Image (spheres, helix red, strand yellow):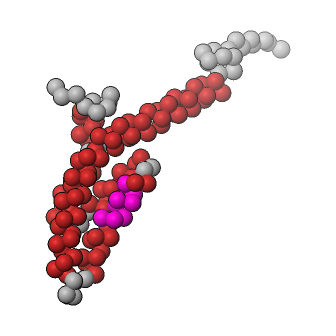
Amino acid sequence: MAKGYTNEGTKWEFVHSFWLVFTWVPFGFLSWFAFIYIAARTKQGKWLFAGIGYAAAVLLAAFTARTFLFDLAMKALLIVWIISIIHAFKTRAEYLVRLEAVYRIKRSNMNDLREELIHEQAPHGPTGTSKVTLTKK
């Protein structure tokens, strides 16, 4: 079995690589979405800027329709589409490692919160047992 980029395993990596599909949409019409998505998941500005750049290429082609620049814009869009696919595959490993770190931090924070709640709920220690003496009046 192939070794993945993370400790989560290849199945986890495959599931979290679904965003790559958006780069395969013809002419790169959704490549921008793929990069904005991974930027949002990992809080990486470089991928946000890439997504904005890919969106600009799509918008340029859309707004130059029925003008003399349309042919040039469509050729540029084809080139940008190919670049975005290559960029996505080169980015995948770093994205998966960063996403794993994000998940690890969230799990750690959740475990800390669970421990805190256990200690809050337990009147006499973390076991949650307390001695209660009932007296008859």
Above or below residue 111? Residue 31 is: below
* Residue 110 locus on image (x, y percent): 51, 33
* Residue 124 locus on image (x, y percent): 69, 16
Count every numbered label the image shows and give the total: 0
Question: What residue is shown at x 21% (from left), y 83% (from top)?
Answer: 69
Quick check: is 25 in the magenta stretch? no
Tell me which corner region of the image, top left, top right, bottom left or bottom right, holds residue 13: top left
Above or below residue 88? Residue 109 is: above
Instruction: Examine the rendering and report whether any part of residue 3 can be seen.
Output: yes
Which SS does the magenta portion mostly show?
Answer: helix
Q: Quadrant of the N terminus?
A: top left
Question: What residue is shown at x 69% (from left), y 21% (from top)?
Answer: 123
* Residue 86 locus on image (x, y percent): 21, 52
* Residue 26 locus on image (x, y percent): 16, 64
Above or below residue 81? Residue 129 is: above
Which of the pair 120/14 is nearer the observer? Answer: 14
Q: Is residue 75 left or right of residue 110?
A: left
Question: What residue is shown at x 29% (from left), y 47% (from top)?
Answer: 91
Q: Is residue 30 left or right of residue 47?
A: left
Above or below residue 58? Residue 16 is: above
Question: What residue is shown at x 38% (from left), y 40% (from top)?
Answer: 99
Query: Which stretch appears magenta?
Result: 47-54
Q: Quadrant of the C terminus?
A: top right
Instruction: Examine the rendering and report whether any part of residue 27 can be seen.
Output: no
Q: Residue furthest bottom?
A: 67
Q: Is residue 21 left or right of residue 96?
A: left
Q: Residue furthest right?
A: 137
